[in-house]
Amino acid sequence: MHAFIIEDDYLIGQSLRDMLERLGFTSFSFARSEDAAIMGATAQQIDLITADVRLLPGDGLAAVEAISAKQHVPVVFITGYADELIDRAPDAIVVQKPIKQEELEDAVRHAMSPGQVR
């Protein structure tokens, strides 16, 4: 399974990769900005997206919305600013930073369950 990690902090991105490997993901791609995420998503088959909300530069939610307009992929938002998603994406699946393996596992399972993919 392939995970697309949208995260502007290198160390958090690598930590997410390690956690997702424990959940059975075997390949990964990364984007550190909104534009890079949108461009990078078009060239590959993605089984899961994890996305930070605040990117430098850009916006993770806007990147996910652009990607989702072209392909249906389960999404888990990884953020320190979960309150921002309440108004912008009330149905979003969110894991609050700092990330805990159990919370990520629950969120990924929920995002990838039938009926959740947008």
Image: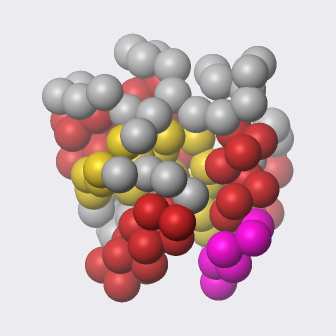
Q: Is residue 69 visible?
A: yes
Percent x, y of residue 100 = 69, 78
Image quadrant where residue 63 sits: top left
Q: Residue drawn 76% across and 67% down?
A: 103
Q: Quadrant of the N terminus?
A: top left
99 on left or right of 103? left
Image quadrant where residue 104 sits: bottom right
Residue 102 inside the magenta-drawn segment: yes
Residue 68 inside the magenta-drawn segment: no
When the figure is inspected, residue 104 is found, relative to residue 113, above or below; the finding is: below
Image quadrant where residue 32 sits: bottom left
When the figure is inspected, residue 100 is found, relative to residue 65, above or below; the finding is: below
Q: Residue drawn 45% across and 34% down?
A: 47
Percent x, y of residue 78 = 59, 63
Start-end of magenta stretch: 97-103
When the figure is inspected, residue 47 is found, relative to residue 72, above or below; the finding is: below
Q: Quadrant of the C terminus?
A: top right
Percent x, y of residue 16 = 47, 69
Percent x, y of residue 105 = 69, 59
Depth check: give the residue in front, 88 or 51.
51
How many numbered marks appear? 0
Q: Residue drawn 42% across and 17% down?
A: 71
Please name the colour scheme applied to the rendered image. Answer: secondary structure
Depth check: give the residue in front, 83 or 71.
71
When the figure is inspected, residue 2 is found, relative to residue 12, above or below; the finding is: above
Q: Residue drawn 66% across and 34% down?
A: 112
70 on left or right of 20? left
Q: Is residue 52 visible?
A: no
